[in-house]
Image: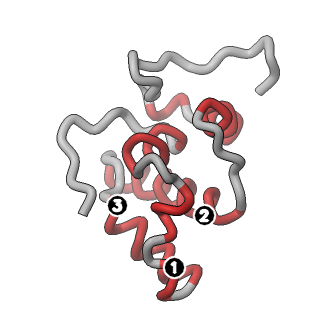
Amino acid sequence: MNATEQLPETDGEGYLVEPLDWTEEVAMALAHQENIQLTDAHWNAIRFMREYYVEHQVAADVRHVMKHLALTHGAESRNMIFELFPYGYVKQACKIAGMKRPRAWSTG
């Protein structure tokens, strides 16, 4: 996404209003706003979250993403999500993955 392109519509907290407007370029722009340099591990989590959203029409609970990371990166990486997105799953991972801001959320 270049400087002349604008992000799709976001709410007051920076979450996409319409998750279907998400692209990988949008994710990179949102990550930049969060001061996150996306790595392969970030993309692994984000793509899983997007696939989950397409299949279930709802954002994946953090426990599903943690399980996915443990399966793909080894059991010791179970808590990797909190290293990848240090300011929180909802605050950063959901935002970068193009999810709407969850109204009520369990992080467990």
In the picture shown, does residue 91 fall above or below 6?
below
Nearest to N terminus: mark 1 or mark 2:
2
Is 86 displayed left or right of 104 in the figure?
Answer: right
Disc 1 crowd rating (10 Å Cα; few below 14, some 14-19, many 20+) is: some
Is 25 displayed left or right of 74 in the figure?
Answer: right
How is this picture coloured? secondary structure
x and y percent of residue 55 in the render? Answer: 39, 55
Say which residue appears at 44% left-offset and 72% top-offset: 79
Is 95 displayed left or right of 57 in the figure?
Answer: right
Nearest to N terminus: mark 3 or mark 1:
3
Instruction: Point out the image quarter for the N terminus.
Output: top right
Say which residue appears at 31% left-offset and 47% top-offset: 58
| Residue holding disc 1 | 77
| Residue holding disc 2 | 44
Secondary structure beneath dot 3 equals helix
Disc 3 crowd rating (10 Å Cα; few below 14, some 14-19, many 20+) is: many
Disc 2 crowd rating (10 Å Cα; few below 14, some 14-19, many 20+) is: some
Query: Disc 1 vs disc 2: Cβ atoms closer than 8 Å?
Result: no
Q: Amino acid at mark 1?
A: Ser
Q: What is the spatial separation of the Cα atoms under label 3 and label 1, in whole angstroms? A: 14 Å
**Nearer to me, 60 or 89:** 89
Q: Amino acid at mark 3?
A: Val
Q: Which mark is residue 62?
A: 3
Q: What is the spatial separation of the Cα atoms under label 3 and label 2, in whole angstroms? A: 14 Å
Instruction: Point out the image quarter for the C terminus.
Output: bottom left
**Nearer to me, 37 or 15:** 37
Q: Which mark is residue 55?
A: none
Is 18 displayed left or right of 40 in the figure?
Answer: left
Q: Amino acid at mark 2?
A: Asn
**Nearer to me, 108 or 17:** 108
Secondary structure beneath dot 1 equals helix
x and y percent of residue 101 in the render? Answer: 33, 33
